[in-house]
Image (spheres, grey):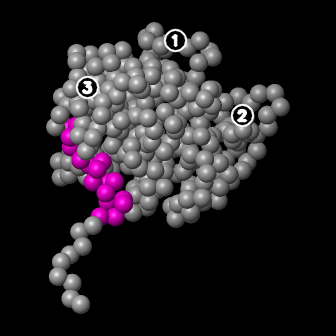
Amino acid sequence: MTQTHSDYRLSQLDQLEAESIHIFREVAAEFEKPVLMFSGGKDSIVMMRLAEKAFYPAKIPFPVLQVDTGYDFPEVLATRDNWVDRLGVKLIVASVEQAIKDGIVIDDGKTSRNRLQIGTLLNAIEENGFTAAFGGGRRDEEKARAKERVYSHRDEFGQWDPKNQRPELWSLYNGRLHEGEHMRIFPISNWTELDIWDYIGREGIEIPSIYFSHRRRVFQRDGMLLSESEHNPLRDGEVAEERTVRFRTVGDLTLTGCVESTASTIPEIIEEVAVARVTERGATRGDDRFSEAAMEDRKKEGYF
């Protein structure tokens, strides 16, 4: 039988891409001064690619912001710089180290640099007058992120109230703000880790080399494999050894673990992720292990 019409149904990945691009364009039209959080990790890189597509052939119409703990992986920072240079976007770096020197946050020797990002980020948002900040949070990562809306309201203190969120029926977003408030925006909220890797493979996206299998000196701590580093001194009884590993997520190297893996290509990573039963944050992020509600507590204070 002759087909008389074209099939315009989109694949799941195309639907997710279209939704995310719609969100980017809505925010650019609605908010006076948005900014894209860009760490150089896989999720923020996918966000950068989506923003690039959303406004092509024009340049991305807002700057990107990285909160630098001082303990970031060099490979991640190199990839961040490659993307910024290629797209010609303005990069703003909010340094935790500088925030400590300026008295914006206090380093008591016990609090992790990851937690000190909260005050550093809120100060950067206030100083620059940003009214909306795009983040790469996904609902499948962690239960606190699963509670959050695409448009996530923050009060004048940068805090999030999980019991007071705005409805988003029919993907209609309420971006109304009072003086001093801002909105966190999550365009890839409905994506999964597997969707991210499928998209990276389809688009041929450049990502940091540490996401792929490589040899690295690591040691065991709290059930995770952490990188040997000057910022990560060994404790009594800990022994560093070289293993074949890769990272599922990247962040503060003193808290971000790796997993033993031989997956050195994107198809191999997709195969590995497809059978994983623990999310990347649950498996390799020490800052989420302090308590059952660690992520939610940080988010209430202003963390992404």
Dot 3: element: loop
Q: Within the magenta stretch, is there residue 23?
A: yes
| Residue at the (72%, 34%) spot, across then down | 222
Dot 3: few (<14), some (14–19), or many (≥20) neighbours within 10 Å?
A: many
| Residue at the (31%, 57%) spot, across then down | 15
From the top left corner, tell me how far across and down residue 261 is, in percent: 65, 55
Upstream in sequence: badge 1 or badge 2: 1
Query: Taking 5 as reference, is 122 above or below it?
Result: above
State the residue position of label 3.
131
From the top left corner, tell me how far across and down residue 80 is, in percent: 41, 42
Which corner quadrant of the image does residue 171 belong to? Answer: top left
Closer to the camera, 17 or 146? 146
Upstream in sequence: badge 2 or badge 3: 3
Dot 1: element: loop
Amino acid type for the residue under numbered disc 3: Thr
Closer to the camera, 150 or 66? 150
- Confirm or deny contact between disc 1 and disc 2 (CB under 8 A): no
From the top left corner, tell me how far across and down residue 128 is, in percent: 27, 21
Upstream in sequence: badge 1 or badge 3: 1
Which region of the structure is painted magenta? 10-28
Q: Is residue 115 left or right of residue 196?
A: right
Which corner quadrant of the image does residue 31 belong to? Answer: top left
| Residue at the (33%, 38%) spot, across then down | 150
Q: CA distance from mark 2 to mark 3?
A: 38 Å
State the residue position of label 1.
106
| Residue at the (60%, 58%) spot, across then down | 275
- Which of the image's four quarters has the N terminus? bottom left
- Which of the image's four quarters has the C terminus? top left
Q: CA distance from mark 1 to mark 3?
A: 26 Å
The nearer-to-camera label among 1 and 3 is: 3
- Confirm or deny contact between disc 2 and disc 3 (CB under 8 A): no
